[in-house]
Image (cartoon, helix red, strand yellow):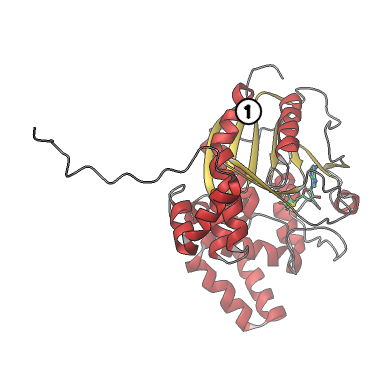
Amino acid sequence: MVKLFARSRPAPVPAGRDNDSEKEIAGRFLALGKQGMLDLMGTCFPGEVARLIESEWPVTQSAFEALAPDDVSEVEACVKKRYGAGTLAELAAWKSKSLPHYRREILRYGCALVPDVVCGKTRMSSANPPPGVHSMMRQDPFAGDLYSGDMVLAALNRARSTVKAGGSYLDFGCSSAALLRNMFAAFPEARWNGCDPVAAAIEWAAKQFPGVNLFVSKQNPPLPFESASLDGAYAISIWSHFSERAGLEWFDEMHRIIKPGGFLVMTTHGMRSLYFYLEKEMMPPDVIAGLLAAIVGRQFAYQTILGCDGLDMTDWGNAFFRPEWVVRRLGLKWNVLDFKPGLNQCNQDVYVLERGAAAG
Ligand SMILES: C[S@@+](CC[C@H](N)C(=O)[O-])C[C@H]1O[C@@H](n2cnc3c(N)ncnc32)[C@H](O)[C@@H]1O
């Protein structure tokens, strides 16, 4: 009897076993080599993620639009006088390379060099945290973080949500308020709250930005808010550090304090971060392979890190997780309204979650 298709059948591939340990699987990923691992991870997100932010920058735009053309010319003249023609030429070059970055730079220099006009018109500030005070950004002059504000607002716009006048909002893990100060400046009619366990950062920020309710929080829930008292919260690079247990507990606490229908914008490490750290050689390939094995197998990977800023490191390390984990573990408590892999600095994923109606 003729065996149809017998020749075209592929040779059987020796299968891995379901119970292979993560270590064995990590070894197989490592054997792919750097490019092989990058190719594998690259199947999880589109190649052009890095560019999205360039067309979406509502916070920068509204601050910049508060300035008249003469104000901008005055800032440029002051940059030349204070820092020289070379710095002015660098600034001008950003106009064609990245208009949002150029405008952020005008605002940054403007707050320091022409404060009466620029701080006066935008409500921004040139307060710069001293070296002992925690901040993720170090610049001189400094006018806070506009990039993350653009990222949060653009994410909310995509999700057809926004910050409302009279609404109450939280920057969870705000450090010394680099972003929060500019959210307060952009939306002065909203009530702004910020918390962080690092007391020195909060104390410095509370003195600089008295219009914001800043307080030192504990590393574990609860937060001192009534149930369903907030319209929304955002957390930049916070869930990227929680262990799985702590991350789930904090999602539950956000579910308690945010009103049904309110938002949580959060950024976290995901597959794109593993790609970023491997590509830039910021983590050794065997460490990446171990995290890759965990995130592929369980959609969640975690590594412990050394202590910093006096924090208890029991549940604070580096977490990497997939949208599948978010959907599976958060269930009906949170709806995923928007997800953009790697949108935060080509590294962290950005999620917009809506507080679902399901009980806690
Ligand atoms: C990577 S930084 C991000 C800071 C800020 N969100 C930003 O983007 O500039 C992480 C912040 O989380 C704070 N943090 C540590 N443990 C925390 C916890 N259990 N709850 C809230 N924030 C925490 C740290 O003190 C630090 O300020």
Q: Which residue is at the front of the view, 236 or 299? A: 299
Disc 1 element: helix
Quarter of the image for residue 299 reads: top right
**Residue under the image location 56 percent in, 59 percent down:** 276
For disc 1, the marked residue is 330
Q: Which residue is at the front of the view, 279 or 175? A: 279
Q: Position of residue 75 (x, y in %)?
A: 66, 69
Quarter of the image for residue 260 reads: top right
Q: Residues within 10 Å of mark 1 (few under 14, many from 20)?
A: some
Position of residue 346 relative to residue 10, above or below, is below
Q: Position of residue 224 (x, y in %)?
A: 86, 31
Q: What amino acid is found at the position of numbered circle 1 in the picture?
A: Leu
Q: Position of residue 26 (x, y in %)?
A: 56, 52
Quadrant position of the N terminus in the picture: top left
**Residue under the image location 60 percent in, 60 percent down:** 286
In the shown orientation, is residue 312 left or right of residue 150? right
In the shown orientation, is residue 4 left or right of residue 180? left
In the shown orientation, is residue 113 left or right of residue 263? right
Confirm or reject: label 1 Cβ below 8 Å from ligand 1: no
Position of residue 92 relative to residue 57, above or below, is below
Position of residue 274 relative to residue 226, above or below, is below
Position of residue 328 relative to residue 117, above or below, is above
Q: From where the camera sits, is residue 112 visible?
A: yes
Q: Which residue is at the front of the view, 31 or 324? A: 31
Q: Residue furthest bottom?
A: 85
Q: From where the camera sits, is residue 58 visible?
A: no
Quadrant position of the C terminus in the picture: top right
Q: Residue furthest front?
A: 1
Q: Position of residue 101 (x, y in %)?
A: 57, 62
Query: Tag count in the figure?
Result: 1
Q: Residue furthest left?
A: 1
